[in-house]
């Protein structure tokens, strides 16, 4: 991972105040202060990755605390997640590294990283210092001030290589307000009444009056949308922006195909020399145990989560190619795809890819050795694991292949002559799902603000609330009532 660990350890100096020893305020260099300020100014997403100490007892204690948190995420004795009012999703997960395991924090929230960390430290600062990051390397101490903990997390934050939001612009407060409008509307419709409503417009008017009498009254007016955002959402502009990406997408695809061809030739040469190794290792007891942990944490509510880590293939061009793929799909995710749909896939709340760099090298020539990378993937989605990956295979195999074909063990892209077709690695559904399972990591603690709401529910509730006071034609009003 990125070699920040040697530079971020809080200074363990104290100053005397009467008869009490208090931690001295940590001196931060101007360069590090500027770096922290840049990270704190980012918005909506934070990824923190810190190595875990090699002490077996400390690792066991860390896993125990995370499991206690994850087993009852809303009533655990360590962190009151409901107090994080601007947080959509948050997780802690122990991911395997090349030399040692790492503790990864992934969060999606409203506002800036700095505001989120202030909120998190206020709610869970004691647990972070005494139960979690005290087992990491470097370790935070319980005596460290909150400012040192915030700087520690900022120093270990990694940039998201590709980040996707399923409902940009919708805050936790907006989602909860829209859900309340929907609940009050259903409450009104369930009231006993005599006769029938005169018209759809009259029903809309009655619903509006009922909502305005609620205590407290929910917010009914839609959020103002800037004209630039409305322009970017038009089909003409999205199609134009999608077309502008082709001069990058076509050369990228050809370069990846060329690399795949070179790798296939290398494998054939190794096979002739008797040095070919299987792409997927044999299924063993460790895989069965890990699969059991994964299945326990899947498909028990409307939403699901996935954590995936895999090594990047060696090669001079692998890092530039995967970074270009991230930039390309990040551009399309921002400017082309509809809200709530990534490549035609519905139900992805938040997703991100992160490159984790390991510069720790040993030996006299460590400066000449190339850094090694791992690719971390976090996703929060609706539905089951099978349906989620099946949707990726059916609708976004080209996106998955252009990113993950740069990683170890991903199914090969194959060219068939009879009939002539190109079979992408993600098109081979069974091999792809087996590869995902092989590199999937059990998530110890995962929090969702609205675990019972799918993307469809969130979008539908917004549509209902935004048109409560709107003047619509009878046909539009009937369409609005159908949303109920």
Image (spheres, rainbow, N blue to C red):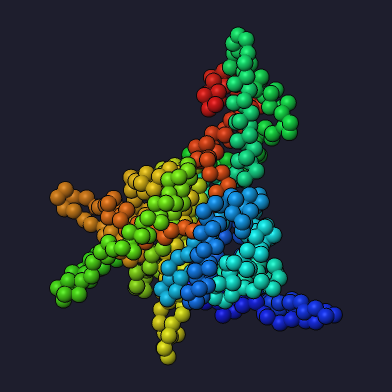
Tell which of 18 and 455 is nearer to you: 18
Question: Which residue lies at the image location 33% right of the left edge and 61% below the top edge?
Answer: 287
Placement of 8 over or under 166, stated as above or below: below
Q: Residue furthest right?
A: 18
Which residue is more in the foreground, 88 or 43? 88
Say above or below: 9 vs 331: below
In the rendered image, residue 478, in percent from the top left (x then y), is placed at 54, 20
* Quadrant position of residue 40: bottom right
Residue under the point 48% across and 76% down: 54
The answer to whether 374 is drawn above or below residue 432 in the figure is below
Between 137 and 290, which is closer to the camera in this rendering? Answer: 290
Residue drawn 55% across and 49% down?
448
Residue 112 appears left or right of 421: right
Residue 419 position, x and y percent, is: 16, 48
The quadrant of the picture occupied by the C terminus is top right
Residue farthest toward the top in the current orientation of the protein? 195
| Residue 340 seen from this side | yes
Check the image and name the residue furthest to the bottom.
Answer: 364
Residue 203 rendering spot, x and y as whole percentages = 62, 18
Is 210 left, or right, of 293 in this rendering? Answer: right
Q: Residue at x 66, y 63 (%)?
A: 125
Q: Say whether residue 330 is visible.
A: no
Question: Seen in the image, is 31 located left or right of residue 296?
Answer: right
- How far across and how far down the image is residue 311, in percent? 38, 68
- Total marks drawn? 0
Q: Is residue 450 depicted above or below 37 in this figure?
A: above
């Amino acid at each position: 991972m990125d070699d920040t660990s040697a530079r971020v350890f809080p200074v363990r100096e104290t100053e005397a105040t009467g008869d009490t020893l208090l931690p001295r305020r940590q001196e931060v260099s101007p360069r590090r202060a500027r770096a922290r300020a840049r990270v704190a100014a980012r918005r909506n997403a934070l990824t923190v990755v810190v190595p875990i100490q090699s002490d077996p007892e400390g690792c066991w204690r860390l896993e125990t605390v995370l499991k206690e948190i994850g087993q009852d995420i809303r009533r655990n004795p360590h962190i009151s997640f409901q107090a994080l009012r601007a947080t959509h999703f948050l997780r802690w997960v122990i991911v395997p590294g090349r030399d040692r395991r790492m503790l990864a924090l992934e969060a999606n929230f409203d506002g800036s990283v700095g505001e989120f960390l202030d909120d998190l430290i206020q709610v869970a600062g004691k647990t972070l210092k005494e139960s979690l990051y005290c087992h990491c390397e470097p370790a935070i101490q319980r005596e460290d001030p909150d400012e040192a903990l915030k700087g520690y997390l900022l120093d270990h934050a990694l940039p998201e290589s590709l980040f996707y939001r399923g409902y940009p612009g919708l805050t936790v407060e907006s989602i909860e307000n829209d859900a309340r409008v929907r609940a009050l509307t259903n409450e009104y419709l369930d009231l006993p009444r005599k006769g029938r409503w005169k018209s759809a417009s009259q029903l809309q008017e009655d619903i509006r009056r009922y909502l305005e009498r609620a205590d407290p009254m929910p917010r009914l007016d839609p959020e103002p949308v800037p004209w630039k955002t409305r322009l970017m959402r038009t089909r003409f502009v999205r199609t134009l922006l999608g077309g502008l990406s082709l001069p990058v997408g076509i050369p990228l695809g050809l370069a990846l195909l060329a690399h795949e061809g070179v790798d296939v030739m290398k494998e054939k040469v190794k096979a002739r020399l008797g040095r070919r190794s299987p792409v997927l290792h044999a299924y063993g007891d460790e895989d069965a145990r890990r699969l059991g942990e994964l299945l326990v944490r899947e498909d028990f509510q409307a939403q699901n989560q996935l954590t995936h880590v895999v090594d990047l293939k060696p090669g001079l061009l692998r890092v530039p190619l995967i970074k270009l793929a991230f930039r390309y799909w990040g551009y399309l995710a921002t400017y082309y795809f509809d809200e709530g749909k990534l490549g035609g896939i519905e139900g992805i709340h938040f997703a991100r890819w992160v490159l984790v760099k390991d510069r720790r090298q040993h030996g006299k020539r460590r400066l000449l050795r190339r850094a090694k990378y791992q690719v971390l993937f976090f996703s929060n989605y609706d539905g089951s694991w099978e349906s989620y990956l099946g949707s990726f295979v059916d609708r976004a195999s080209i996106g998955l292949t252009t990113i993950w074909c740069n990683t170890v063990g991903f199914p090969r892209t194959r060219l068939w002559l009879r009939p002539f077709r190109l079979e992408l690695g993600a098109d081979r559904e069974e091999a792809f799902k087996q590869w995902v399972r092989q590199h999937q990591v059990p998530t110890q603690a995962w929090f969702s603000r609205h675990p019972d709401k799918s993307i469809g529910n969130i979008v539908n509730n917004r549509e209902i609330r935004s048109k409560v006071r709107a003047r619509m034609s009878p046909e539009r009003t009937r369409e609005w009532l159908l949303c109920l």
